[in-house]
Image (tube, rainbow, N blue to C red):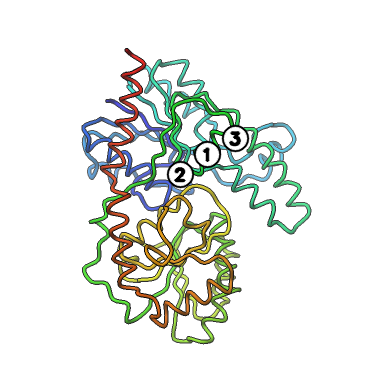
């Protein structure tokens, strides 16, 4: 098949969850014998020089880009608030240059399938339908308005809460406006699939989690004689900021007094200056910012902290950490969609007290860390192999296409 994927940022190199979710599937498609074009925004915030890496890609992968500055512009946000019905976050990705480039790709190519990656690219579905008869898949990376819902609940400022409520209402309406406009729905978790069913979806559904090549993450040696705690994730994403502060203030501050030799390392890009300043005010905390090699960082450390309290979709960093043989200490929200077992594949704790006790047990080696580490690696190998997951999704597409043709 010839496939077109459209995304709101260049998915290579695959550093964060979104780009990993897109590019790993691209690689899976190509390894199964398909050709893939990717049309994506190259944003100022996540800008990459595509000429620097195109030679690293398979000849069956072609990336086409449109530059976009997604910086928050107060005047445009204010104009959007009073004169638009769209959520500002989504409106920023509606772009005439991208539309023209998309039309050009559709006119010059005959695609068997077009896969729209994420909600913010869904406004282009009408353009796609106008210029091609290709089947369209919507790959829903998460339920966007659920993230905003949780953000509104926790906001304390009255004015900001009022503004966020407006955004939430618009986001909910925006998200639901695309139900059944696609030919296939591809949510990333069973929980998300249940949401879309309740929202009225009647199109064929296939849950496709993000896979990876576990062998690429496997460390040469795993040792828990020295516990090395870390967090890794995008630090411009509110749920990560919220979860970190919750963990530091409710758990880490007291644990680090008991174990002053322990250090908690935090890695992630695009952290706001005020958030960096806050992180650096805490003791026994090592803020690293963006790191060059996430795999090497995970292999160097051995306990991943995932203190998420809100969010949607699946935390890809967890499956990377498990593949690296790390112990994962996470909230239930953080581990959503992975379906591992507590104290077998990872450790789950939801209250400050349970999280603190679990962390102490890890530091004291009261848990069978080596066994949990081995279990985690086998779990990823058996459940998140990228080639197997990609082939399953392709089989789904081809079976439905074949049925419709007959």
Find residue 204 and report its horizontal and vertical position in percent.
44, 27
Instruction: Indicate which disc residue 91 carries.
Output: 3
Please name the residue shown 52% across and 81% down the image.
255
Contact (Cβ within 8 Å) of mark 2 with mark 3:
no
Query: Tag 3 or tag 2, which sits nearer the N-term?
Result: 3
Please name the residue shown 22% across and 42% down the image.
55
Q: Name the residue under label 2.
A: 189
Q: Determine the CA span between mark 1 and mark 2.
A: 9 Å
Query: Tag 1 or tag 3, which sits nearer the N-term?
Result: 3
Asked whether 265 or 193 is in front, the reply is 193
Please name the residue shown 45% across and 44% down the image.
189
Is 305 rendered above or below residue 116? below
Q: Mark 1 points at which residue?
A: 194
24 sits to left or right of 142? left
Q: Give the class, few, some or many, for how many residues have Cα within 10 Å of label 2's Cα (few <14, many ≥20).
A: many
Q: Where is residue 309, by image quadrant?
A: bottom right
Q: Quadrant of the C terminus?
A: top left
241 sits to left or right of 74? left
Find residue 299 and report its horizontal and vertical position in percent.
30, 67
Q: Where is residue 209, by image quadrant?
A: top left
């Amino acid at each position: 098949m010839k496939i077109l994927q459209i995304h709101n940022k260049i998915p290579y190199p695959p550093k964060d969850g979104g780009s990993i979710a897109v590019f790993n599937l691209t690689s899976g498609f190509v390894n199964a014998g398909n050709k893939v074009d990717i049309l994506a925004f190259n944003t100022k915030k996540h800008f990459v020089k595509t000429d620097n890496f195109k030679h690293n890609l398979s000849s069956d992968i072609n990336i086409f880009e449109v530059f976009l500055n997604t910086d928050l512009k107060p005047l445009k946000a204010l104009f959007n608030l009073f004169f638009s019905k769209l959520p500002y976050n989504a409106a920023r990705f509606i772009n005439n240059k991208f539309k023209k480039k998309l039309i050009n790709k559709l006119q010059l190519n005959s695609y068997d399938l077009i896969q729209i990656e994420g909600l913010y690219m869904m406004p282009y579905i009408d353009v796609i339908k106008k210029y091609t008869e290709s089947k369209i898949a919507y790959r829903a990376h998460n339920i966007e308005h659920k993230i905003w819902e949780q953000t509104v609940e926790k906001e304390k400022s009255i004015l900001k809460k009022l503004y966020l409520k407006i955004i939430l209402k618009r986001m909910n309406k925006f998200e639901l406006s695309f139900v059944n406009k696609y030919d296939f729905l591809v949510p990333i978790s069973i929980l998300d699939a249940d949401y879309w069913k309740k929202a009225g979806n009647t199109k064929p559904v296939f849950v496709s989690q993000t896979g990876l090549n576990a062998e690429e993450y496997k460390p040469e040696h795993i040792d828990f004689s020295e516990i090395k705690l870390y967090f890794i994730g995008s630090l411009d994403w509110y749920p990560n900021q919220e979860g970190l502060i919750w963990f530091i203030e409710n758990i880490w501050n007291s644990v680090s007094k008991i174990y002053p030799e322990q250090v908690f390392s935090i890695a992630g890009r695009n952290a706001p200056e005020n958030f960096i300043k806050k992180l650096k005010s805490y003791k026994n905390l090592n803020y690293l910012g963006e790191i060059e090699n996430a795999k090497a960082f995970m292999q160097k450390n051995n306990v991943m902290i995932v203190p998420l309290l809100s969010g949607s979709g699946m935390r890809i960093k967890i499956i990377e950490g498990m593949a690296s043989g790390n112990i994962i200490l996470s909230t239930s929200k953080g581990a959503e969609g992975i379906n591992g077992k507590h104290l077998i594949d990872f450790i789950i704790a939801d209250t400050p007290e349970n999280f603190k006790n679990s962390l102490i047990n890890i530091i004291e080696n009261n848990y069978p860390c080596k066994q949990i580490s081995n279990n985690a690696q086998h779990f990823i190998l058996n459940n998140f192999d990228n080639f197997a997951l990609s082939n399953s999704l392709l089989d789904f597409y081809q079976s439905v296409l074949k049925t419709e043709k007959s």
